[in-house]
Every structure is written in C-alpha cells, then in structure tokens.
Amino acid sequence: METSKKAQKIGILTAGGDCPGLNAAIRGVGKTAIVEYGMEVLGFNAGYLGLINNDYTELKESQLSGILTLGGTILGTSREKPYKMVKKNGKTDTHKPEKIKKNYKKLGLDCIVCIGGNGTMKTASMLAKEGLNVIGIPKTIDNDVWGTDVTFGFDSAVQIATDAIDRLHTTANSHQRVMIIEIMGHHAGWLALYSGVAGGGDIILLPEIPYNIRSVCKKIENRYEDNKPYSIVVVAEGIDHPKNQTAASHLSEAIQTYTGIETRETVLGYIQRGGSPTPMDRILATRYGAHAAQCIAESNFGTMVAMKNNELTTVSLEEVGSNLRLVQPEHPLITKARKMGVSFGDEYQLIE
C-alpha cells in the first residue's frame, strides 16, 4: 500500500508597481496549483511586507474566480525591499530576511511565487540563495526584465499609450503644433518605441539612443518645410534631461526656443499602469501562472518563468536579478521605422 504524499503548500505575492494582468497571474498560479496538483495556496498581502509580517490569506479556488479581467492586484503590493539594509544605533538592521525565513518555515511552505519586475526578481534571487524555494513571474509595463521576450502588463500599456497618441494627432493637426507625449520607461524605451511606432510618432526618443536637441528641431523644421503642419514627439521619461524638469517640459522649452513653433506637452503618467488587462496580457499572465505551478510540482526552483520564441521556459533567478533587457539601437523595429522617416534624434551631425 502506497503512503499518501502530503499536499504542497505554496505562497503567492505581488511586489513593486502594479500593472494590468497581476490578478490573471495570481489566478493562473492558484487555480492550476489547486485543481491540477492539489496544493494549498496562501496569498501574502502587500508584497514582501506580507512575508515579513506573516500577513496572508488562504486562497480557495472560489476566490480566484472572477478576477481574470480585474486590474490591480487582490493581494495588494508594495515596494518593500527586505535586503535594503538600514542603520539603527550604528548597527546594520538585517531582521527582515530573518523574519521571512522564520515565517516560511513556520508556515511549512514548499515554495513562494514572486510576481514582479526587476527589483522583485532580485529579492527573489537573494531569498533563493538563503535556501528558500522560490519561483519568479515577470511583470512590468516597461518590458525590461532580462531573460524573457515579453512581460505581462506591456501589451496593455502599449494600448493605453497608443490610444493617447492617436488622440493627440487631431489636436496637433487642428492647431498646427508640436505635441510631445512622455511615456514611462526610466532605463528601457520599449513602451515608447512600440507605442510611438503604433501611434505614428514622427520623433521617438529612447534612453538607449543618445539624442541631440538640434537634430530633433531639424526634423521638425523639415516637416514644416514639406507642408506637414504638425509633429508628434514620443519620449521615454528616462532620456537625458535636467532633473528639475520632466523630459517633456525640457523638450517643449527647447523646441520652442530653437524653432519658434508652438509646442505643448502631455505626461501620461500612471494612467499607463491602470485598468483591465488586454486579452493578450490575460493569456500571457495565465500561461506564466500555470507554468509556475508546474515548475513547483517538478521542483524546478530558483527560476523565473519566461517566454522565448513563444515557448514557455525558465531562466535562473540569479541571472535575471542583475540584468536589464534594454532596446538595442539596431532593433528591427527601429530599423524599419527609420526607413519610413521616423527620427530617433540622432540623425544629424552638428557643424559648429
């Protein structure tokens, strides 16, 4: 007679900034874990804070129904970084990782699924080194998590940003203005690139491609000389600019100064991160979640689920935590856009 195996108990948390698709990922992990593998599932509240404070809710299958289309996260999130050391009375405070390990063992967890971006994966990697079983799921609208071709949240943000750019075209045309729209992306310009191309941007500025403001202005002036009465400039927030201004306001002032053409700016901000996920993000988050549950069943720990050439796979958390996936200047979409006349701010050499 075979001895029955004790059902695994797992935890799920969502950390970092919110984005569309988090609930779909929670559902993907939870439902697969419960229905397919008979696991017990705990949801930790407010990201890593939940692990530190032992603040959790047991998730039943019924609680995971109806959340596929919801924006935000039913578990809440925070930007808590357990390994960010602080000085107290001259001593380094390291109690947070110890609390996490203590609660992990106390609850009898077999694995923690950490859903988040680069910071979340870095913390997950450090927890794995402490001996905890951890699996990561990549999310971020910036699409900059290393080791995967795409993160969920990106497609939803592209749709939102593209819709905003579409709407600016009519105002720009009506008033014959330069319209600048600032898109999220501190280090990576994926969102600005994709929404800029999809929205018909005339100039797209990315953190990865150094731009020259005179080059930007020259492009705008050439368009006016070609009887194109308005220009759309799509800019990632992380381009080089004075820190006491937004990227959009800096560009607006410079363009008006050099060209004399009326210029207006829009900073899209947190609107890009909210709302219901697109069908593509629902599917991607579901696939990631289900695959994470499978990895737990197969004891494939210390990894992040990833998409490579439209195939699900895993990569080492240790590799992910110290890298960023950035836009390469020779990316095919950039090459094709240049051939259609799109400027990336680096076309003209100045003659002093």
Image: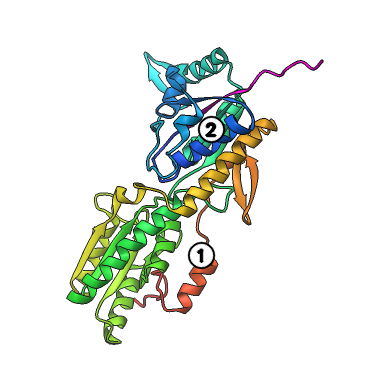
Is residue 82 something one can see in this rendering? no
SS at badge 2: helix
How many dots with numbers?
2
Whether residue 10 appears in magenta in the rendering, the answer is yes
Whether residue 36 appears in magenta in the rendering, the answer is no
Q: Nearer the viewer, residue 221 or 57?
A: 57
Q: CA distance from mark 2 to mark 1?
A: 39 Å
Q: Given contact means CB atoms under 8 Å apart, are the residues at marks 2 and 1 in contact?
A: no
For the stretch drawn in magenta, what is the main secondary structure? loop
Q: Percent from the top left, x then y, of residue 244?
A: 24, 49
Q: Nearer the viewer, residue 344 or 213?
A: 344
Q: Percent from the top left, x then y, of residue 248?
A: 27, 59
Numbered range of the magenta stretch: 1-13
Q: Quadrant of residue 316?
A: top right
Q: Nearer the viewer, mark 2 or mark 1?
A: 2
Question: Label 1 crowding class (10 Å Cα cut-off): few <14, some 14-19, many 20+?
Answer: some
Per the image, the residue denoted by label 2 is: 30
| Vertical comparison of 167 with 224: above or below | above
Q: Percent from the top left, x then y, of residue 56?
A: 44, 21
Is residue 165 something one can see in this rendering? yes
| Vertical comparison of 20 with 159: above or below | above
Q: As shown in the figure, which amino acid type bears the numbered disc 1?
A: Pro
Q: Is residue 127 left or right of residue 195?
A: right
User: Mark 2 or mark 1: which comes first in sequence?
Assistant: 2
Q: Percent from the top left, x then y, of residue 28?
A: 53, 39
Per the image, the residue denoted by label 1 is: 329
Q: Is residue 130 left or right of residue 163?
A: right
What's the residue at 59%, 40% (across, down)?
290
Q: Is residue 350 left or right of residue 303?
A: left
What's the residue at 41%, 58% (across, down)?
158
Question: Label 2 crowding class (10 Å Cα cut-off): few <14, some 14-19, many 20+?
Answer: many
